[in-house]
Image (tube, helix red, strand yellow):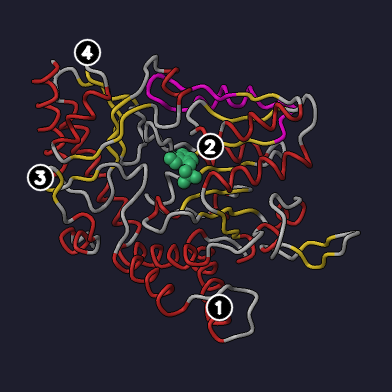
Amino acid sequence: MSIDIQKVRSDFPILNQRVYQKPLVYLDNGATTQKPKVVIDEVAKIYSQENANIHRGVHYLSEQLTQKYEDARKVVQEFIHAAHGHEVVFTSGTTESINTIAYSFGEKYIHEGDEIIISTLEHHANIVPWQMLCERKNASLKVIPVNDKGELLLDEYEKLIASKTKIVAVNHVSNALGTINDVKKIIDIAHQKDIPVLIDGAQSIQHGKVDVQELDCDFYAFSGHKIYGPNGIGVLYGKEKWLNELPPFMTGGEMIKNVTFEKTTFNELPFKFEAGTPNYVGAIGLAKAIEYIQGIGLENIESYEKELLEYATQKLSAVDGLKIIGTSAKKISVISFILKNIHHYDAGMVIDKMGVAVRTGHHCAEPVMHRFNIEGTIRASFAFYNTKEEVDRLCEALMTVKQMFG
Ligand code: PMP
């Protein structure tokens, strides 16, 4: 089965508009994805008909919405194939999910002299929390290097693993270059030494099937807004064993069993990690988004986006003076590039005026930019609602950029 692109595009109201008198071409899906009408309608329905705080009230609306929130958890559990529903913790996004583990795991298990392994390809969200932890604990960060294609050097990774290594945290897919990392191998290598692994799945979850049990990752983090769901919701998957062992990150209401002024006991999983009123609207909207993409089929999404990537790579490679940064053999539908003698911001401004939305800059991944000795790139990131005609529109915009600055 293939994707009915016109039907799919009509599901996303925002795509059908003109900017600067031109049909909008939205190629900034790595930053955030657009929302199908089913998600928008679901959010509107909750606020207009169903809203009540969950887990607290004994009244009708509260009970109904509590059930929907827990059903949403089940949808996520099945989507990532977690063994238990209580291994799915709702957070505000990937950033909060990673911070939760960096703090909670860090407080309990990281001590002076310990080491944490990350990679050159990380987003700042998977660097800074570990760096701050290292500062608090006098521990140190070790970084897996990459080759000129933007692929992690796994031989070097193996050499970095030492008796002091306490956790490995790497992304599944690089937001800056699109590289798909062999996380299964990274996890297997770490597990041979009983080292847990956190996977930042912010850029992978929306592009292909993720099975946390098959990967055997200890933690997996992702954001709702990058998988066609609402903003302000995300997921932290953690193996039951870890979530039971770890102390809570945030404290307050909902995450407690009993509170006296002398002592507090914590709630069971997953509530121990969901302090305060959770973003139930976001969680239910996220479940709708997941059901929507399941309706399209992840295999269909994967193969269509692969076709788009191949087409775009071929078209962009033919542009004189354009260099693609990140040429890994395995990539998702992201192309980062630079233009000879033209600053990415200048290019971005002109591309925008042509009605094409791309991202320019360091993409919150400054160390990757340093590795390639550049300040930033222009990044086109494609979703399954993009078309080859839109790739052509990007190429036309680049021609205008070259005429103006070349
Ligand atoms: N990791 C990666 C690889 C990302 O691409 C992003 C978002 N650009 C994040 C983490 C942070 O996600 P969020 O801002 O949704 O928390």
* Mark 2 or mark 3: whose residue is earlier in sequence: 3
Q: Residues within 10 Å of mark 1 (few under 14, many from 20)?
A: some
* Mark 4 or mark 3: whose residue is earlier in sequence: 3
Which picture quadrant has residue 55? bottom right
Query: In the image, is residue 244 part of the stretch drawn in magenta?
Result: no
Specify the quadrant that holds the C terminus. Answer: top left
| In this rendering, position of residue 216 left or right of residue 31 | right
Q: Residue 393: horizontal and vertical position, in percent? A: 12, 39
| In this rendering, position of residue 284 left or right of residue 378 | right
Report the Cα–Cα distance between label 1 and label 3: 44 Å
The secondary structure type at the circle numbered 1 is helix
The reply to whether the residue tagged 2 has its Cβ within 8 angstroms of ligand 1 is yes
Residue at image location 15% in from the left, 41% down from the top: 355
The secondary structure type at the circle numbered 2 is helix
The secondary structure type at the circle numbered 3 is strand
Specify the quadrant that holds the N terminus. Answer: bottom left
Asked if marks 1 and 3 touch (Cβ < 8 Å), the reply is: no
* Mark 4 or mark 1: whose residue is earlier in sequence: 1
Q: Residue 101: horizontal and vertical position, in percent? A: 66, 45
The residue carrying mark 1 is 67
Which picture quadrant has residue 105? top right
Q: Tell me the kind of residue under disc 3.
A: Lys
The magenta span reads 143-166
The residue carrying mark 3 is 22
| In this rendering, position of residue 60 left or right of residue 18 | right
Q: Tell me the kind of residue under disc 2.
A: Ala
The residue carrying mark 4 is 341
Residue at image location 54% in from the left, 64% down from the top: 77
Closer-to-camera residue (370/204): 370
The residue carrying mark 2 is 125
